[in-house]
């Protein structure tokens, strides 16, 4: 929680919403948020895999924290209230604990493996939607065709998008591009969704726990296996 609070403080005081000048697509606020995260996580003796700085710290314990300091930084730069700090503790290759703090809504989603998922301390669960025709689906990227959903939303930040699936706000979520997301974008929220009863897979059948800064994946999530299968079928078209 301290890490999320530290990033919230960065957002509250930032006045530079321009590019960092370090790499394409990185904002100055991304760098400041990353520094706030690393200071606390390294101070706790943890290794870190961050979108902004790669792998740093001592990983001798077999534990590493995957962190996206500010998922949805373009939203943040434009004043769209949908962005988050996402952290996932991975021990010996297994995601164990997760936090997704939505800075736009103030909601904090947490998950512990085997203990369920919570929003602000209250247990959440996915919807019971099995039919694509009645599903509200979140999207990332541009689909090639209408998948046959009831409605869709393109909200612009993978971690809070996926948490909306966990809470039953969305029925599913689909990355319609290919290999556009790093593990920091989805891993914390993946654990939240799974602990809420949903399913998350890579559209190409690969392991989503890809602890390599250069690895990219194509996550698809759904409240039920039936809806997941329908989304994957349409995506393959």
Image: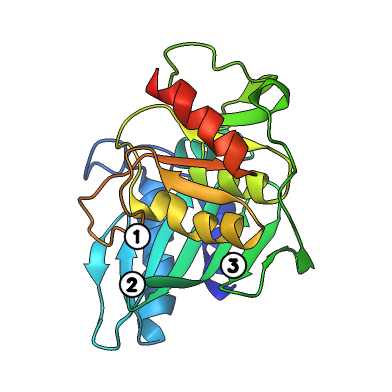
Q: Quadrant of the C terminus?
A: top left
Identify the secondary structure beneath mark 2: loop
Crowd class of label 3 (few under 14; some 14 to 19; many from 20; radius 10 Å): some
Residue 212, above or below 58: above
Answer left or right for 163 relative to 220. right
Compute the Cα span from label 2 to label 3: 27 Å
Task: Point out residue 143 in the picture as x, y percentages from the top left corner.
Answer: 45, 18
Crowdedness near tag 2: few (<14), some (14–19) or many (≥20) residues, C-alpha within 10 Å: few
Task: State the residue position of label 3.
Answer: 5
Of the image marks 3 and 1, the number of the one nearer the N terminus: 3
Q: Nearer the viewer, residue 155 or 28?
A: 155
Q: Which residue is mark 1?
A: 209
Q: Are marks 3 and 1 in contact (CB under 8 Å)?
A: no
Q: Is residue 220 left or right of residue 203?
A: right
Relative depth, front residue between 201 and 37: 201
Q: Quadrant of residue 42?
A: bottom left
Question: For the residue labelled by badge 1, is the local secondary structure a helix, a strand or a loop?
Answer: loop
Pointer 2 residue:
93
The quarter of the displayed image where residue 203 is located: top left
* Residue 60 location, quadrant: bottom left
- Residue at 60 percent across and 74 percent down: it is 114
Q: Is residue 66 left or right of residue 191?
A: left
First along the sequence among labels 2 and 3: 3
Classify the position of the N terminus by image quarter: bottom right
Query: Which numbered disc, 1 or 2, marks the residue that appears first in the sequence?
Result: 2
Q: Judge whether 230 appears above or below 211 on screen.
A: above
**Are the residues tagged 1 and 2 within 8 Å (C-beta)?**
yes
């Amino acid at each position: 929680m301290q890490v999320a609070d530290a990033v919230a403080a960065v957002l509250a005081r930032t006045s530079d919403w321009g590019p960092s000048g370090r790499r394409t697509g990185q904002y100055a606020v991304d760098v400041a948020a990353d520094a706030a995260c690393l200071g606390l996580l390294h101070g706790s003796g943890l290794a870190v895999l961050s979108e902004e700085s790669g792998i740093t710290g001592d990983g001798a314990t077999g534990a590493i924290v995957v962190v996206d300091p500010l998922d949805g930084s373009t939203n943040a730069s434009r004043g769209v209230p949908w962005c988050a700090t996402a952290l996932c503790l991975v021990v010996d290759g297994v995601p164990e604990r997760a936090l997704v703090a939505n800075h736009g809504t103030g909601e904090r989603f947490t998950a512990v493996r085997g203990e369920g998922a919570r929003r602000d301390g209250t247990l959440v669960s996915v919807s019971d939607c099995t039919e694509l025709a009645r599903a509200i689906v979140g999207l990332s990227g541009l689909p090639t065709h209408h998948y046959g959903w009831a409605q869709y939303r393109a909200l612009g930040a993978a971690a809070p998008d996926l948490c909306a699936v966990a809470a039953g706000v969305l029925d599913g979520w689909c990355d319609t591009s290919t290999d556009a997301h790093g593990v920091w974008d989805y891993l914390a929220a993946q654990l939240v969704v799974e602990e809420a009863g949903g399913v998350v897979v890579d559209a190409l059948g690969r392991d989503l726990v890809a602890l390599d800064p250069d690895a990219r994946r194509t996550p698809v999530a759904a409240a039920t296996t039936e809806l997941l299968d329908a989304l994957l079928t349409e995506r393959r078209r």
